[in-house]
Image (tube, rainbow, N blue to C red):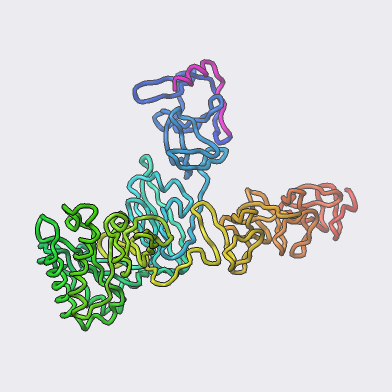
């Protein structure tokens, strides 16, 4: 702000176009609260914008120049550390914002189109960076099939269809509330969730309605007795098996393999835990008809490799896992899988023995591609991966882990619309980006030479066309930036004299409709329609609209 003082010792004050007041001379003053602009008569600016030199400022009700985000007259503005109002494209805290010539934040997209299982941050989904800087942001939805985390604003649709996401929060003390439309298409990846007693009482009918297609239930965890476990057995496993069965949901189980002591796990520890799981299964056989997913061994505790030399870890883990699996096989439970995170698969579970099992990989990421890793010289693709642990879904109190199931081949980029996080494009059946015009659901869209969907005015060849914020081509009368245009049946902007609904209009070379003026011997009225059989001042126009006499 001291730079301002040096520059504007004797500046003339000029108001921007958004200010109703007249310019008056004055000078800057400062106290421990901030800066204000005092007129020569001793008064100062309050509750208004003021343009001083080349920059526009806003002074609050107490008269101080503001900084940061401010919501003024139903519009967002940003003032930098010098209190300058920003215009144009600006980077604020590494996020890109666009302000118009009056400093108003340009409205971003209010809709998102994606696929089931596509995880994306809300501000990227809705192309609204303001969401990323909100305080106390909270995301809610009117439909079950859109999951989210309050903390990070991650969205992950679990079912196709339409929904509305409401975002609330505060920014610099101002309340923020906005609704965003969500349109979700299907995906060949199945979306599941894994549960334990940690989630408490679960309404699996609501879970199913939310779009979750399968669940993985915890059978137990080692030998622990805690609030959620009794001698290693999950307190909710018997209830959850019945509820999942009643909801007719496909499911699997997992067991967290652990040691009975603070020392490394033993072969006997593994056998004892397997017998606990067998006991659960044998007493719930009536519920197992929908157990189409494996029984997973959860390998993640350091007790599994504690004190084992690196060169012997793989073989030791192999012996532990084999002891567990042998017990299950002996009781005819043969669909066994392995769960671990990426680090474990790369560094510990690197014996070829493990390549025979279905892999459930913990891979917390916004990626939508199937994760893979190497064991020896063999490329392993996880048939399922856990994408995150902080999602909210209907029917569950608290946060939930969500999972992608790749049991069937998944083509990530199918024919149709795709979103990169910055722009939309359209793939044909040959997995190629389409350029030029695309017709989709009786609407036309235009893609540039790189296949990027366009909005606003475009001129592919000789004619201009207008595309709305969703990219759809418009037709007929359209009011664009307070000017009227007529777009023909083909969508092309028309110019010159045009007969529309039995009336004549004159459209200028820019396409703008003319009004209240003579065009040669013809007059166009306030509505733009050509006047006929009437007097225009002292001039009379005939039934064809042509001037034919004067008073």
Residue plotted at (26% across, 75% down) = 244
Estimate the x, y position of residue 299 in percent, counting from the top left. Answer: 23, 61
- Which percent across, then down, holds residue 23? 56, 25
Dominant SS of magenta comes to loop
What is the residue that sits farthest to the bottom in this orientation?
Answer: 286
428 over 486 or under it: above or below:
below
Q: Position of residue 530 (x, y in %)?
A: 79, 56
Instruction: Note whether 204 is above or below 65 in the view shown.
Output: below
Instruction: Give the camera-side residue of 174 and 141.
Output: 141
Q: Is 205 situated above or below 527?
A: below
Q: Please name whichever residue, 279 or 359, is drawn nearer the observer in this view of the structure.
A: 359
Image x and y of residue 65, in percent: 43, 29
Query: Which is nearer the eye, 476 or 416?
Result: 416
In the figure, is residue 533 to the left or right of 15?
right
Q: Which residues are magenta?
A: 1-16
Q: Is residue 234 magenta?
A: no
| Residue drawn 90% across the image and 53% down it | 548
Hey, which quadrant is residue 95 in on the image?
Answer: top left
Which image quadrant for residue 372? bottom left
Q: Does residue 205 appear in this view? A: yes
- Look at 70% across and 53% down and name the residue there: 459
Tell me which corner region of the image, top left, top right, bottom left or bottom right, holds residue 469.
bottom right
Q: Residue at x 46, y 61 (%)?
A: 182
Viewer-closest of 282 and 290: 282
- Outermost residue to the front: 311
| Residue 400 shows up from this direction | no
Q: Quadrant of the N terminus?
A: top left
């Amino acid at each position: 702000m001291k730079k301002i003082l040096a520059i504007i010792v004797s500046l003339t004050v000029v108001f921007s176009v958004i200010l109703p007041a007249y310019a008056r001379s004055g000078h800057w003053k400062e106290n421990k609260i901030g800066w204000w602009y005092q007129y020569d008569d001793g008064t100062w600016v309050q509750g208004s914008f003021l343009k001083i030199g080349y920059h526009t400022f806003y002074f609050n009700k107490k008269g101080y120049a503001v900084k940061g985000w401010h919501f003024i007259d139903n519009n967002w503005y940003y003032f930098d550390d010098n209190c300058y109002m920003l215009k144009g494209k600006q980077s604020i805290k590494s996020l890109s914002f666009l302000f118009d010539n009056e400093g108003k934040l340009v409205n971003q997209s209010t809709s998102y189109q994606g696929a089931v299982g596509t995880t994306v941050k809300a501000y990227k989904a809705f192309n609204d960076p303001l969401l990323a800087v909100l305080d106390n942001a909270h995301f809610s939805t009117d439909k079950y099939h859109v999951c989210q985390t309050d903390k990070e604003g991650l969205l992950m649709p679990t079912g196709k269809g339409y929904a509305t996401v409401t975002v609330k929060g505060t920014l610099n003390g101002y309340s923020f509330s906005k609704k965003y439309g969500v349109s979700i298409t299907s995906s060949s990846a199945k979306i599941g969730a894994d549960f334990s007693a940690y989630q408490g009482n679960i309404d699996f009918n609501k879970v199913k309605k939310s779009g979750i297609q399968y669940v993985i239930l915890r059978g137990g965890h080692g030998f622990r007795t805690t609030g959620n476990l009794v001698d290693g057995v999950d307190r909710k496993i018997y209830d959850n098996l019945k509820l999942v069965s009643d909801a007719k949901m496909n499911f699997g189980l997992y067991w967290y393999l652990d040691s009975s002591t603070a020392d490394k796990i033993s072969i006997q520890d593994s056998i004892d835990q397997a017998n606990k799981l067998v006991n659960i299964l044998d007493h719930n056989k009536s519920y197992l008809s929908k157990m189409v997913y494996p029984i997973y061994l959860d390998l993640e505790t350091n007790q599994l490799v504690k004190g084992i030399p690196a060169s012997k870890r793989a073989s030791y883990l192999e012996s532990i896992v084999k002891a567990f699996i042998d017990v299950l096989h002996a009781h005819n439970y043969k669909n066994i899988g392995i769960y671990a995170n990426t680090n474990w698969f790369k560094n510990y579970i690197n014996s070829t023995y493990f390549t025979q099992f279905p892999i459930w990989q913990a891979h917390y990421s916004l990626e939508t591609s199937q994760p893979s890793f190497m064991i020896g010289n063999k490329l392993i693709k996880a048939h399922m991966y856990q994408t995150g642990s902080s999602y909210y879904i209907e029917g569950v109190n608290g946060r939930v882990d969500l999972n992608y199931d790749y049991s069937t081949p998944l083509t990530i980029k199918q024919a149709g619309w795709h979103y990169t996080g910055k722009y939309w494009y359209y793939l044909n059946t040959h997995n190629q980006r389409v350029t030029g015009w695309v017709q989709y659901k009786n609407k036309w869209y235009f893609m540039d030479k790189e296949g990027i969907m366009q909005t606003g005015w475009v001129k592919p060849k000789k004619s201009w066309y207008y595309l709305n914020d969703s990219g759809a081509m418009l037709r007929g009368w359209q009011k664009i930036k307070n000017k009227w245009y007529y777009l023909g049946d083909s969508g092309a902007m028309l110019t010159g004299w045009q007969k529309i609904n039995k009336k004549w209009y004159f459209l200028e070379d820019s396409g703008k409709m003319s009004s209240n003026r003579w065009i040669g011997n013809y007059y166009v009225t306030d509505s733009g329609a050509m006047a006929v059989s009437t007097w225009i001042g002292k001039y009379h126009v005939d039934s064809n609209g042509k001037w034919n006499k004067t008073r």
